[in-house]
Amino acid sequence: MSKVPYEVYTEEVEALSVLSPEGEIVNKSLLPKLTDDQLKEIMYRMVFTRTWDDRAVNLGRQGRLGFYAPVSGQEATMVGSEYALQKEDFVAPGYRDIPQLVWHGLPMYQGFLWSRGHQHGGQIPEGVNVLMPQIIIGAQILHAMGIAMGFKLKKQKQVVITYTGDGGSSEGDFYEGLNYAGVYKLPVIFFVQNNGYAITTPFSKQTAALSIAHKAVAAGIKGVKVDGMDVLAVIKAVQDAAERGRNGEGATLIEAVTYRFRPHSLSDDATKYRTKEEEGEWSAKDPIARFAKYLAKKGLWTEEDTERVKEEAKAKVNEEVKKAEKTEKMTVAGLIDSMFETTPKHLEEQKAEFK
């Protein structure tokens, strides 16, 4: 075996791109094979997701949602990564990844219930291969390992994708997951949405590594860095990673370099650590505007299409919010019963006390 010089690990890794910010193809070899209808569906989902995010932020500020983590700017990473999967594949999300769950089959009103802390938000319907959003940073990565090991033992051609942010890549669970997946060659995709900040901590203070993708080397798995503002590049990266997983070639770590236009949460003030100049630079790379330019040149999308989707999204979100608000309120007895097939005697006594 030839020795690899250490210097190779200190070289910059360029993020893979398919489209320029002007919507021009810059790397035809990476262009995923998609029909015109598929391209329009992807755009539909991206516009829908941003409109949904606008509405959810307002609902959160009205006190009607509880916890909510904004997503605008990350539509390419969220929509693109999920679209590259098959419905039989599994999604293990963090708390910001509700769009992926809904596009993978979770009813939207249950996503709203999860934000409100209602137990029904975590009762996943049969046939929807997702876990409930994980509030503990990085914990979903270990859950994904168990699912992936199950696929491997049963010789099933399925993969699991698990999401975290750049801050989550500093958690112990992240390194344990990478190592475990490397040792057992598991069909798992580690998808890191690197938006440059772990709440207020900039990426430069998060790690001394030049990229998160570099960290795949130590685990013995494939590492990829992709332009997270380019939905076609994201789709291609996840398609390739899923194919590797299905073929028994093991795990892939994908670092998607993106930028969230809104703060970390509704209680965060991003103006204290982000500059107007930085925000302006990233706004010019808006994933929706970039993809819209590409589709417009192909005669597949217009401003009228965008407005139509926005109206559909507003109506759908309002409908689903009302459904969540009409859901029967939780009780202590109901919560206890939902956790056990046969409720233990001491908890039956507690239920009686609450009644």
Image (cartoon, rainbow, N blue to C red):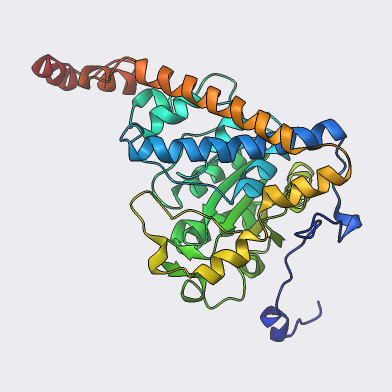
Q: Is residue 301 left or right of residue 307?
A: right
Q: Is residue 299 above or below residue 15?
A: above
Quadrant where the N terminus lies?
Answer: bottom right
- Residue drawn at (36%, 33%), measured in percent from left and top? 65
Considering the image in quadrants, where does the C terminus appear? top left
Can you give x and y, in whole percent of width and height, for residue 303 in the image? Answer: 73, 38
> What residue is drawn where x is 50% and y is 26%?
317
Query: Looking at the image, can residue 155 be seen?
Result: no
Seen from the viewer's position, the closer of residues 344 and 164 is 164
Q: Residue 22 sits in which quadrant?
A: bottom right
Which residue shows up at 68% across the image and 40% down it?
A: 159
Q: Residue 305: horizontal and vertical position, in percent?
A: 73, 32
Q: Is residue 294 left or right of residue 346?
A: right
- The residue closer to the viewer here, 161 or 100, is 100
Seen in the image, is 252 located left or right of residue 126?
right
Q: Residue furthest front?
A: 304
From what the image shows, is residue 335 above or below residue 190? above
Q: Is residue 353 visible?
A: yes
What x and y, as percent, mark residue 270?
41, 61
The answer to whether residue 125 is left or right of residue 8 is left
Which residue is at 80% across, 33% downward? 38
Quadrant of the image occupied by residue 179: bottom right
